[in-house]
Amino acid sequence: MEKDLLEEEDKKIRWLRFLVDLAQATLMQSNLTLREAFDIVDDTKRAALNLFPGKEHVYDLVYGPRFQRIIAERFLIPDGSVGRN
C-alpha cells in the first residue's frame, strides 16, 4: 500500500517536471505575446495545484522566480518585475 502511494507521488512529480520544462521551453523559444506568456504560467500553476492541492506556497517559492526571470529576460523588462495588474 505505501509503495503504491510512493509510486503515485513519484509519477505526479515526474509529470509536474515535464509540465514545467515544457512551459519553460515554450516561454523561451516561442513567439508569444506577454499575455500568452502569463497564460502559460497560469495554466502551469493550475495544473501543478491540481496535482498537489494546497501547495501553492511551494509552487510560488520554487517555480515563481524561475518563470519571472524567463519572462523578464524574454520580454526585456528592465527591472525584472513582471507583476500583473
Image (spheres, rainbow, N blue to C red):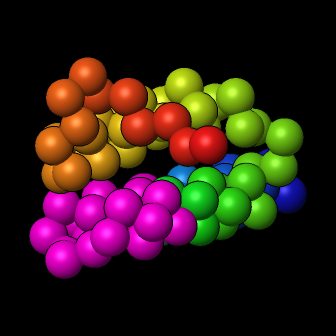
Is 75 left, or right, of 85 in this rendering?
A: left
- Using the image, determine if residue 28 lies above or below residue 83: below
Q: Is residue 4 magenta?
A: no
State how many labels appear. 0
Is 75 left, or right, of 20 in this rendering?
A: left
Q: Is residue 32 magenta?
A: yes
Q: Residue at x 84, y 40 (%)?
A: 54
Q: Position of residue 43 (x, y in %)?
A: 59, 67
Q: Position of residue 44 (x, y in %)?
A: 55, 62
Q: Residue at x 73, y 54 (%)?
A: 49
Q: Residue at x 54, y 25 (%)?
A: 61
Q: Residue 17: name its quadrant.
A: bottom left
Q: Residue at x 56, y 43 (%)?
A: 84
The reply to whether residue 3 is visible in this rendering is no
- Residue sitting nearer the eye, 79 or 56: 79
Which of the image's four quarters has the C terminus?
A: top right
- Residue sitting nearer the eye, 2 or 16: 16
Which of the image's four quarters has the N terminus?
A: bottom right
Q: Position of residue 57 (x, y in %)?
A: 70, 28
Q: Residue 76: name its quadrant.
A: top left
Q: Which residues are magenta?
A: 17-39
The reply to whether residue 80 is visible in this rendering is yes
- View extreme (bottom): residue: 31
Per the picture, the main secondary structure of the magenta-coloured stretch is helix
Is 30 left, or right, of 46 in this rendering?
A: left
